[in-house]
Image (spheres, grey):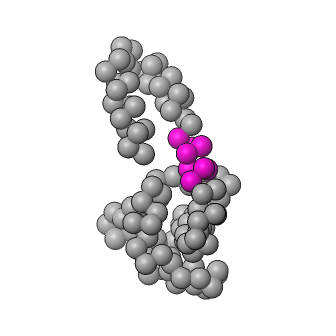
Amino acid sequence: MFEYYKQLIANNARLSDVSSTAVKEAEKLYPMINFYENQFKYLRQSQDGNRNLHFLHTLKLCYELGLARDLDLVQELQEAIFHSHAPTEPTQELSSWIYFLDHFIRCMILPERL
C-alpha cells in the first residue's frame, strides 16, 4: 500500500494536465488489485490462513449485507458461520487488508473473487 502512495506522489510531480493525466496514472497503478489477489493466495497457504480468510470472508459479508463492522459482530458471525475464531489482533495480522476507524473495521480493498 505504501509503495502505491509513493508511486502516486512521485508521479504527481510529473502531472501537467491533472484531469486527463490522473486517469492515465490510475490505470497504470491498477495492478494493485493483483497485489491483493496474490496476498489472498498467500493467506491460503499460511499457517493461520483459515481463520484470517474466514475473517475476511465474514467482513466482506458484512459489507454486502450492510451490517455494522464492529469487531464483536464480525467475530460472532465468523464463529457462527465458519466455526473458527477471529484473529486475536486482526489489524496486525491483516494490516495490508484492514484498519479500524471509529470503532469499525474498514477494508482497504477486497478482490471480487474472495
Residue sitting nearer the eye, 102 or 25: 25
Q: In the rendered image, which quarter is residue 51 located in?
A: bottom right
Residue 35, magenta (yes or no): yes
Overall secondary structure of the magenta section: helix
Q: Which quarter of the rendering shows the C terminus?
A: bottom right
Residue lying at 59% horizontally and 65% vertically, measured from the top left:
46
x 38%, y 24%: residue = 11
The N terminus - image quarter: top left
Q: Residue at x 51, y 52 (%)?
A: 109
Could you tell me how many numbered marks the image carries? 0
Q: Is residue 65 above or below residue 96?
A: below
Where is residue 76 shown, x and y percent of the image?
A: 52, 84
Numbered range of the magenta stretch: 32-39
Residue 83 in view (yes/no): yes
Give how far across and how far down residue 29 sits, in percent.
50, 32
Looking at the image, which residue sits at the far top?
16
**Residue 58 seen:** no
Residue 108 higher or lower than 83, as above or below: above
Which image quadrant is residue 59 in? bottom right
Q: Is residue 103 left or right of residue 43?
A: left
Give left or right: position of 35 versus 14. right
**Residue at point 39%, 31% (across, down):** 8
Residue 69: give x, y in percent of width and height. 46, 70
Asked whether residue 99 is drawn in magenta, I would say: no
